[in-house]
Image (tube, helix red, strand yellow):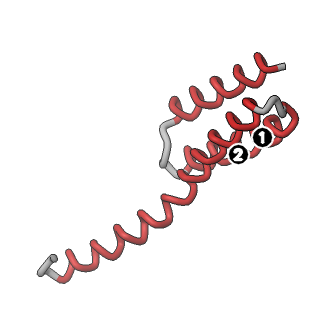
Amino acid sequence: MPNIKSSKKAVKVIAKKTLNNHEPKARVKNLIKNIEKELSENNIEAANTLYKDFQKACDDAVSKGLIKKNTADREKSRLAQKIKNAK
C-alpha cells in the first residue's frame, strides 16, 4: 500500500483507467471469437454483420490507444480474408 497521498490517488486513477480500458479491448476480442464461431458454422451473413461491428470497435480501440494501429489492421485483414475464403 502506498504511503504518500499522491501515490494513493494514483492507485485509484490507475484502477479506474484499467476498468474503462478493459471493456473496449474485451469487446474486440469477443467479436473476433464470435466471427470465427459463425464462420465455423458456415453462417457467413452473420459473420459479415459481426465484422462490421468489429471494424468499428477495433477503430475505436485504436483511437483510444488501447490497440496499436498495425495490430488492428492485421486483425481486420485476417478476418476479412477468412470471411472471403468461406464464401
- Residue positioned 20% across, 75% down in the render: 7
Compared to residue 24, the image places residue 80 above or below, namely: above
Of residue 63 and residue 51, the one placed in the foreground of this image is: 51
Of residue 29 and residue 17, the one placed in the foreground of this image is: 29
Q: Residue furthest right?
A: 45
Q: Are marks 2 and 1 in contact (CB under 8 Å)?
A: yes
In the rendered image, which residue does mark 1 sit on? 52
Q: What whole-number distance in Å separates the C-alpha atoms at marks 2 and 1?
A: 7 Å
How far across and how far down the image is residue 33, in percent? 63, 41
Of residue 78 and residue 2, the one placed in the foreground of this image is: 78
- Residue positioned 79% across, 36% down in the render: 47
Count of labels in the image: 2
The kind of residue on which mark 2 rests is: Lys
Q: Secondary structure at mark 1?
A: helix
How far across and how far down the image is residue 73, in percent? 59, 29
Q: Secondary structure at mark 2?
A: helix
The kind of residue on which mark 1 rests is: Lys
How far across and how far down the image is residue 28, in percent? 60, 46
- Which quarter of the picture shows residue 50? top right
- Residue positioned 33% across, 76% down in the render: 12
Q: Please state, as top left, top right, bottom left or bottom right, where the N terminus lies in the image.
A: bottom left
Of residue 38 and residue 2, the one placed in the foreground of this image is: 38
In the rendered image, which residue does mark 2 sit on? 56
Q: Residue furthest top?
A: 85
